[in-house]
Amino acid sequence: MISQPAPALAQTPVARCEFFLLMLKSHERASGYKALSAIEQADPPKVTIEFEMRNKAHAPSRSTGSCEFDRDRRHITFFTLEGLRSQIVQ
């Protein structure tokens, strides 16, 4: 008997934002990024995450990124990374 596939887990806005920002930062030559803290605001829906970058050549450094969601929290509409704010047009 073939079993039914497990339903996809719904990701929280914090997890979605962290994944999105890490994907944007993945092109940089850093050893790795680690999320230190996350703050979720309700109105407007916004998540702010503080990251620590570890690189063998440099001391650890910190950066902050944020994601703004539409009202139903389905889509990221704006993101801020390294102080630059960008809009996502769908």
Image (spheres, rainbow, N blue to C red):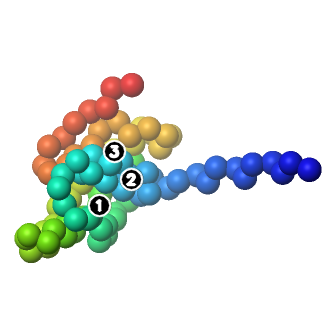
| Mark 3 closeness class: few <14, some 14–19, many ≥20 residues within 10 Å | many
What element does badge 3 sit on?
strand
What element does badge 1 sit on?
strand
Q: Residue at x 14, y 72 (%)?
A: 56
Give coordinates of residue 3: x percent, y percent: 84, 51
- The amino acid at mark 2 is Phe
41 left or right of 4? left
Camera-side residue: 2 or 63? 2
Nearer the viewer's eye, disc 3 or disc 1?
1
Image quarter in which the C terminus is found: top left
What element does badge 2 sit on?
helix
16 left or right of 8? left
Camera-side residue: 13 or 56? 56
Label 3 – label 1 distance at C-alpha: 12 Å
Q: Earlier in the sequence, mark 2 or mark 3?
A: 2
Residue 62 is labelled as none
Label 2 – label 3 distance at C-alpha: 14 Å
| Mark 1 closeness class: few <14, some 14–19, many ≥20 residues within 10 Å | many
Residue 71 vs 6, above or below: the answer is above
Q: Residue at x 26, y 64 (%)?
A: 33
Label 1 – label 2 distance at C-alpha: 11 Å
Nearer the viewer's eye, disc 1 or disc 2?
2
Q: Earlier in the sequence, mark 1 or mark 2?
A: 2
Q: Residue furthest right?
A: 1
Q: Earlier in the sequence, mark 3 or mark 1?
A: 1
Which residue does the numbered mark 2 point to in the structure image? Answer: 19
Which residue does the numbered mark 3 point to in the structure image? Answer: 68
- The amino acid at mark 1 is Ile
Which residue does the numbered mark 1 point to in the structure image? Answer: 49
